[in-house]
Image: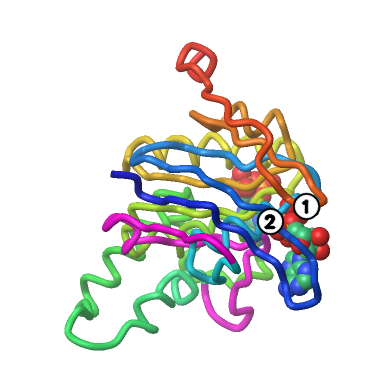
C-alpha cells in the first residue's frame, strides 16, 4: 500500500488562485521522490497537502500507517536563536506530552545520536548564530530525524546554500535516507539535484500547477 497518495487532489485558494490542478499519484515505501519545477508550480502546495499542513479543495490525500511518523523540513532552518543546538533538536520531545513521552535519559541519547548523524556531535552546546548556514540546516535535519521518522518531507531545504555545501548535504541526506530506509519527498528547482538524489523525479509546471512528467531514475544512474 502506498505511504502517500494523492487522488485527484487539487488546491484552489480563497483568492481564486488555482495553485494545484488535480493530481493523482502514489508514493511507495522507501522511494526518494523529487518534486521538480519552476517557482510557482505548486511544489510547496503539494508537499503541504501530503504533510496535512493544508487540505485539498477537491479530491483527497491518503496516508499509510508509516506516515504517522512523518517529519517536515522547512526551507529555512527556523531555529530558536536563544537556545543551544541540542535544545533546538530536542524541541519535538518538549512539545510531546502524555504517555508516549520518553524519559530524559532516552531523549538525551536520541538528541546525541541525531546530532552525530548530521556531523554535529561536537556542536551540541553551540548557539545557532555561531554556525554556518550549512550547519544550521544540519541542525534542522537533526531535529526532523530525532523522532525517528519513516517519512521525511523537505521543502527546498538546501536552496539558500552554496553549491559545495549543498553537495555535501545532498550526500549526507542520501546516506541517512538509505540507512534508515526513509520515504522522502524532496522539493527542488534544480534538475541536477533532483536526478542526483532521487529514485523518481516528478516534474511540475505552473499556471495552474500540475504534474507534467513522472520519471523513474534507474539505479545505474543513481549509483554511477
Ligand atoms: P512552488 O512551491 O512551486 O514555488 P507554491 O506551491 O508555493 O509553488 O505556489 C503555487 C501557486 O499558488 C503560486 O502562484 C503561489 O503564488 C500561489 N499560492 C501559494 N500559497 C497561496 C495562498 N495561501 N493564497 C493564494 N495563493 C497562494
Ligand atoms: P557544512 O554544511 O558541510 O558543515 P559549511 O560550509 O556550512 O559546511 O561549513 C564549513 C565548515 O566550517 C564546517 O564543516 C565547520 O567545520 C566549519 N565551521 C563553520 N562555522 C564554524 C564555527 N562557528 N565553529 C567551528 N567550525 C565552524
Crowding at mark 2 (Cα within 10 Å: few <14, some 14-19, many 20+): many
Residue annotated with mark 2: 20
Does 25 sit left or right of 156 as displayed?
A: left
Q: CA distance from mark 1 to mark 2?
A: 6 Å
* x then y, percent, for residue 83: 54, 80
Query: Which sits in the foreground, 21 or 83?
Result: 21
| SS class, disc 1 | loop
* x then y, percent, for residue 135: 61, 55
Q: Is residue 222 magenta?
A: no
Q: Is mark 2 within 8 Å of ligand 1?
A: yes
Q: Quadrant of ligand 1?
A: bottom right
Magenta range: 58-84
Seen at 40% across and 49% down, the residue is: 117
Crowding at mark 1 (Cα within 10 Å: few <14, some 14-19, many 20+): some
Residue annotated with mark 1: 208
Image quarter where the N terminus lies is: top left
* x then y, percent, for residue 215: 57, 26
| SS class, disc 2 | strand
Seen at 61% across and 27% down, the residue is: 195
Query: Which sits in the foreground, 90 or 212?
Result: 212
Amino acid at each position: 500500500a502506498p505511504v502517500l497518495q494523492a487522488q485527484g487532489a487539487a488546491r484552489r485558494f480563497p483568492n481564486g488562485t488555482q495553485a494545484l490542478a488535480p493530481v493523482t499519484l502514489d508514493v511507495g515505501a522507501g522511494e526518494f521522490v523529487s518534486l521538480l519545477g519552476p517557482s510557482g508550480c505548486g511544489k510547496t502546495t503539494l508537499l503541504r497537502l501530503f504533510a496535512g499542513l493544508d487540505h485539498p479543495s477537491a479530491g483527497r490525500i491518503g496516508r499509510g500507517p508509516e506516515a504517522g511518523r512523518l517529519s517536515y523540513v522547512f526551507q529555512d532552518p527556523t531555529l530558536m536563536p536563544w537556545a543551544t543546538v541540542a535544545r533546538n533538536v530536542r524541541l519535538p520531545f518538549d512539545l510531546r506530552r502524555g504517555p508516549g513521552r520518553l524519559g530524559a535519559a532516552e531523549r538525551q541519547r536520541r538528541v546525541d545520536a541525531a546530532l552525530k548523524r548530521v556531523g554535529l556531535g561536537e556542536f551540541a552546546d553551540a548557539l545557532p548564530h555561531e554556525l554556518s548556514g550549512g550547519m544550521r540546516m544540519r541542525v534542522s535535519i537533526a531535529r526532523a530525524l530525532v523522532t525517528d521518522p519513516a517519512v521525511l518531507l523537505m521543502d527546498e531545504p538546501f536552496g539558500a546554500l552554496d553549491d559545495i555545501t549543498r553537495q555535501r548535504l545532498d550526500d549526507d541526506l542520501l546516506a541517512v535516507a538509505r540507512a534508515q530506509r526513509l520515504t522522502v519527498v524532496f522539493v527542488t528547482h534544480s534538475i541536477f539535484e533532483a536526478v542526483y538524489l532521487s529514485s523518481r523525479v516528478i516534474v511540475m509546471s505552473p499556471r495552474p500547477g500540475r504534474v507534467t512528467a513522472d520519471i523513474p531514475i534507474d539505479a545505474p544512474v543513481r549509483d554511477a
